[in-house]
Each structure stands twice: as structure tokens, then as C-alpha cells.
Amino acid sequence: QVLLVESGGGLVQAGGSLRLSCAASGRTFYSNTMGWFRQAPGKEREFVAVISRISSTYYADSVKGRFTISRDNAKNTVYLQMNSLQPEDTAVYYCAADTRYRTVIPTTAREYDYWGQGTQVTVSS
């Protein structure tokens, strides 16, 4: 069982920055692939970024160059640094954990088996 708790969301003006954190329970955090997804009102949940157990990263095209995912295994925490935020980034952001071994980095929601409760990010124009 993995418990994920996100924090760091809020209201920011366009062009601003936020850093999301996701604290995970459990002794095997270091072996999990961790992802960030987001869901805007009326839209499906979409992939944002992922970091593997060996810290390989991959990003959605819409956030590449603006967002950075990182992890601190000593703190059981994964981060999402979001810069140059735009109104279209407004969504509930979810942290997710994939505890299974894979040879391909997971980028779809169904590949993740644990989810946080989400944190709201609102970007005003």
C-alpha cells in the first residue's frame, strides 16, 4: 500500500511558478516510478511528467521546457517544478505511483496503481 499526499498548489499569475510536492509512504519509494497527471474541468486526465526509479524523465510536449520533475528518495518525495505557467495549465494535479517493474516508462493513467488526492493549480491571465 502506498499513500500519496500532494501539496504546493495554488493561484498564480501567468508567467509565474509553482512547485508541487508529493510525499509517499512506504519503504520502497526508491523502486517506484512516479508520475504527475492533471485534469482540467470537463477534460480527461492527462499525463504531465514521469520519473523512473533510475531518475529517467519524460514530459508531455505541452510542458516540455517549462516543467521539471525530480525525486528525493531520502525524503520519499517527488517534485514538479512548474515555470512559465499559462492559463491552460489550470487543473487539478495528481501524483501517481507505478510499483511494477517495466521496461518502458509508463505515460498512461491505467499503468499507475496508486494516486494522491490531487492539488488545485489555477493560473490567471
Image (cartoon, rainbow, N blue to C red):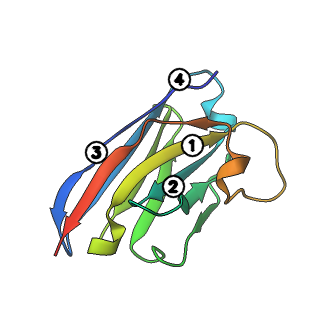
The C terminus lies in quadrant? bottom left
Sequence-first tag of 3 and 1? 3
Q: Which residue is mark 4?
A: 25
- From the viewer's perspective, is the residue at label 2 or at label 3 nearer? 2
Q: CA distance from mark 2 to mark 3?
A: 15 Å
Judged by depth in the image, the label closer to the viewer, 4 or 2, is 2
Q: Contact, CB < 8 Å: mark 3 with mark 4?
A: no
Residue that badge 3 annotates:
8
**Residue 37, horizontal then vertical, whole percent:** 51, 55
- Where residue 68 sits in the image (x, y, percent)? 44, 63
Measured Cα–Cα span from mark 4 to mark 2? 19 Å
Q: Nearer the viewer, residue 57 or 117?
A: 117
The first of marks 4 and 2 along the sequence is 4
Q: Which mark is residue 37?
A: 2
Amino acid type indicated by mark 1: Ala
Check disc 1 and report the residue beneath it: 96
Is there a contact, CB below 8 Å, between mark 1 and mark 2?
A: yes
Numbered disc 3: secondary structure = loop
- Name the amino acid, label 2: Phe
